[in-house]
Structures are given as C-alpha cells and as structure tokens.
Image: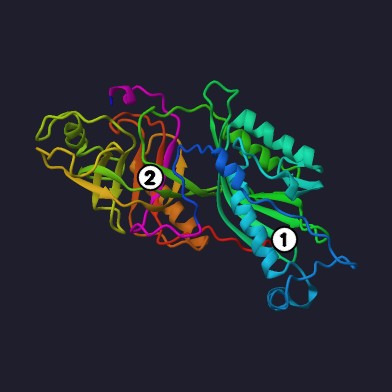
Amino acid sequence: MAAMANTTSLRSRLLILPPPPALPTAVSFRLRPCTTTASSSSQRRRPRLAARVAPPGGAVAPASAASKEDEQGEMGSGGGLSAADAERLCEFLRVDLPHLFDDVGIDRSAYDDRVRFRDPITRHDTIDGYLFNIRLLKLLFRPDFYLHAVKQTGPYELTTRWTMVMKFMLLPWKPELVFTGLSIMGVNPQNLKFNSHVDLWDSIQNNEYFSSEGLWDVIKQLRIYKTPDIETPNYLILKRTAHYEVRSYAPFLVVEAKGDKLAGSSGFNNVTGYIFGNNASSEKIPMTTPVFTQASDGTLSDVSIQIVLPMNKDLDSLPAPNTAVTLRKVEGGIAAVKKFSGRPKEEIVLQKEKDLRSQLLNDGLKPHPGCLLARYNDPRTKSFLMIDVTRWVWSFQCVIRKVK
C-alpha cells in the first residue's frame, strides 16, 4: 500500500451496481487479460463458405420451398437471403471472426475481391487493403477481439456486436484502447460473399469516414496514466459510450468493514490490517486493487469499505478475521462505470453518481440503488490515480438493433 500511496494522481472512476444478474446468453464472456491460440486441429475443422452462383436475374434461389416461405415471412416479397443462408452466414461469422487477430486469421475466400471497408478513421476498397488493415492493427496494437452477437438486419445484411481491446505497443507506457460497436456486413446476392464491412463505434456520434470525433476518441485513449501493477477483479467491457462503460464482472472476494462516507477512509486500517496479518493465522495476504467504498442504499448513507482479495483465494481457504471485518463473495454481474479525474471529494462523487444514474436512465438501463467508488491507491492520500463510480444495473444484453 505504501507503493500505492506514492503513485502519481491522474484519473478517477465511478461505478453503479444491481444485484448481480446472470450473464445474458448473447454475451461471449472472456475475462481480461485473455489470449486465445487456436490449435492446428481447430484450424482444420473451421468451416469454409462455399460460394453459390445466382440464377439469371441476380436473385439467390432459396434452397427449398420451406426456406422460401421463411424468407418471405421475414423479408416480405422483396427478396433477400433465405432463412437457411442467413443462419449459415451468421454461424460462419460466429466461428470465423474470433480469429480476426490470431494466427489462424479470417477466411479470405468468404469475401469479395472488391470488399468495401469503412470505420470512422479508416477505409479500404479491396480485400488486400482489408487484410492489410487487420495485419497493421495486429502489429501495432495486439488486439483482443470479443464477439457478442450476430444477427440478420437486412435482406442482404448481417450485423455483429463486439468489443476490441488493444495496447499501442509503440508507446513506452503501452496505453490500452477499448472500442465497442457494431459491424454491418453486406452480402453480395450473386455469390453470397461479404462485399462490405462498416464499423460503428458506440463512443462517438459521427461514424462517417473521416470522423474527427473518431480520431479524437483514439487520441484521448493514448494518454499517459499508471495504475498499480497488482491483481484486480476480472471484467469485460461490453459497451463503451462517450459517458460510461458497461462491464461484465466475474465473481470476486472482499474483506469489508464499516465506513462513514463514499469518499472517506474510515475502516481502512481494519481491512488493511486483515491482509497485513491481523487474522487468526497471522497470514499476510497479497495486496490487490482497487479499494472500494460502497453505499448500498438509495440515500448513499449506509457505507462500507472493502479491499479485493486475490483471485486464487476462496472463503474456505482464508484465515478468520481478528477484528471487526467480514469476508464476503461478490457474485459479479453487470456494472455501469463512470471515470473521472482528480481527488474524489464527497460532493464530487455524489454529483458523478447523479450524472451516471441520469445517463443510464436516459439510455433505458435500470440502475440499482446505491453505488460503488473504486480507488486504485490509498484512500487517505490527497490525490488519486484512478477512480470509478460504479452502479450495478438490473440487466443488460448485447443486443443488435437495425441501424436506420
């Protein structure tokens, strides 16, 4: 903790939490940090898309009478992918896209030679340019890609929802950049290959190329900051907006004591005393981050202070406390997180909590009463490196809606 107290102050965060809901089935939940290397056998088994020649007139013939009925039921008389073809392409993307940045790579044969790629700051009009962009990102940023959902959203259009986490390797501090959003994948009716790929980021309003807002979103994430290089609860960012993040947290353990206020430090000596050896077996437990202060009621007056315990511990293996602290398992779940800079004085924290609650309600999310303040160094120091105001939310799903 002494090392944490000497850390330069840069940033804060606020979190809002509900009773931990079960993870939605649409979310492909992989914890940070996460790297996946496909085996040679999995490379051999990966399905390949077979191109199909369209009949005269350009419309793709349905595979059967049943699929024609399904097609007309979903797309109307205007035509489009058959239900069977749509599901086949969706399943292909579910299998293929997780290999976007690994050694397997995506299946080039599934794309037209003249594939059109756009995101807010990049554009390419050939498959070679498209693949070059993927290689460049892999070289400079070492991305981790998480696919959450795939859905048909137009007659010849599929849309995916995803998270991409990257580290810019050319800068000494290797800043982490996070993007979440939608990819709209166009399908060529003539051969059922993908002929367009347009990315829309959740964090900006103007997603048209070239977006100065998109460039500024990248630059902001290259800032210099440092957090203690110690263990922290695992989470995956499901959605990153301009104002907050939606995260899926894995379960974790805390040692907890009574606190006085969200920005206070009352009870801190009790919880740190437990990990420093003031317990039944005098066991010293490795330090983790962050330090939480949690208000569990709507008035933000019932406050506790918590330290996260190492992820390899369970309640049965931890020594019994000697002082007025308790051990508890936090089941995890979906949390909305707001980051902010500077020392978190009580009035600042309360305003950030109010702002976050309002933003969540405006976006159709239902925050649970109370909130959680996460600090990444000693809460008794006069400056703070990083703070989250967090609210658990009742529910959140990585759903895809058609973009108008």
Q: Residue at x 28, y 26 (%)?
A: 1
Q: Residue at x 77, y 41 (%)?
A: 123
Q: Specify the segment rendered in magenta.
A: 2-26
Quarter assignment of residue 316: top left
Q: Earlier in the sequence, mark 2 or mark 1?
A: 1
Residue depicted at 52% across the width and 48% down the height: 243
Residue 362 in picture, x, y percent from top left:
52, 61
Quarter holding the C terminus is bottom right
> Can the viewer see residue 300 in this picture?
yes
Residue 14 part of the magenta-drawn span = yes
- Crowd rating for badge 2 (residues with CA inside 10 Å; few <14, some 14–19, many 20+): many
Q: Nearer the viewer, residue 67 or 131?
A: 67
User: Main structural element of the magenta stretch: helix, strand or loop?
Assistant: loop
Whole-angstrom CA distance, mark 2 to mark 1, is 44 Å
Q: Which residue is mark 2?
A: 349
187 in relation to 170, above or below = below
Q: Position of residue 156 (x, y in %)?
A: 75, 63
Q: Classify 114 as above or below 84.
A: above
Please tell me the numbered disc located at residue 157: 1
28 relative to 251 in the view: left or right:
right
